[in-house]
Amino acid sequence: MKAAEQLIGFPALTVIPILGFAIDVVTHLILSRLPFPSGSVHKQFVSFAIGFASTIAMLLLTLLPIAIDPLDIAAYLLLQMLIYAFFAFWLFNLLNLNVSSLRIRIIKELYRQHPKPVPDAVLRAIYGMSEILDARLLRLERGKQLYRSHDRYFLRRGLVLHIAHFFSSLRSLLFGRLA
């Protein structure tokens, strides 16, 4: 039996990217509970790198004892890295969905009132959590997606507005109602 035929249906190859992803999740959970000086995205990149390195190490430990062609090893590495990257990308988007959704909701609220400006007090009444809203509004101002004048926010045209439009349209299309 050829060495490559030994790998057909080899269960470890199926489990390796899932184990790497589990390491990514556990690492992120640990980093999230430690007093880490940087933000959430940095923790996500660190946990991604640890999970990625673990996936490669587990794959090499599985494949190297078997006498197979180096090109096959490279192909398995590429495939397993892509599968792991898919899982990690899903986690990254899941973790960042909460942060992005508030910014998109703010822009949608400003768009609903456009061209009239939205008073600061109205946004604060809608979203309630003042410190979170302050951080998001500051980020939107720095990103040139809106500007503030006389305690009122004005919408600027930009990429995030187009993204909000896209997802509103997609939601309407998929769920049959206006978002």
Image (spheres, rainbow, N blue to C red):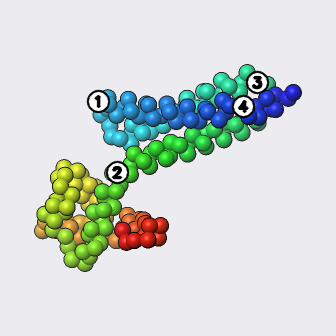
Q: Quadrant of the N terminus?
A: top right
User: Residue 9: x percent and y percent?
Assistant: 74, 34
Q: Nearer the viewer, mark 4 or mark 2?
A: 4
Left or right of 45 on screen, residue 121? left
Which residue type does callout 3 highlight? Ile
Single out the residue that lies furthest toward the right: 1
Crowding at label 1, few (<14), some or many (≥20) Cα neighbours within 10 Å?
A: few
Dot 2: element? helix
N-terminal-most mark, 4 or 3: 4
Q: Quadrant of residue 145?
A: bottom left
Q: Are marks 4 and 1 in contact (CB under 8 Å)?
A: no
Distance CA(mark 4)–CA(mark 3): 12 Å
Single out the residue that lies furthest toward the front: 176
- Residue annotated with mark 3: 66
- Residue annotated with mark 2: 98
- Residue annotated with mark 4: 10
- Residue annotated with mark 1: 35
User: Residue 124: x percent and y percent?
Assistant: 16, 59
Distance CA(mark 1)–CA(mark 3): 43 Å
Query: Which residue sits at x=38%, y=51%?
Result: 97
Distance CA(mark 4)–CA(mark 2): 38 Å
Query: Which residue sits at x=31%, y=67%?
Result: 108
Dot 1: element? loop
- Residue 166 appearing in the image: no
Which residue type does callout 2 highlight? Asn
Which residue type does callout 1 highlight? Pro
Q: Nearer the viewer, mark 2 or mark 1?
A: 2
Q: Is residue 71 above or below residue 57?
A: below
Q: Nearer the viewer, mark 4 or mark 1?
A: 4
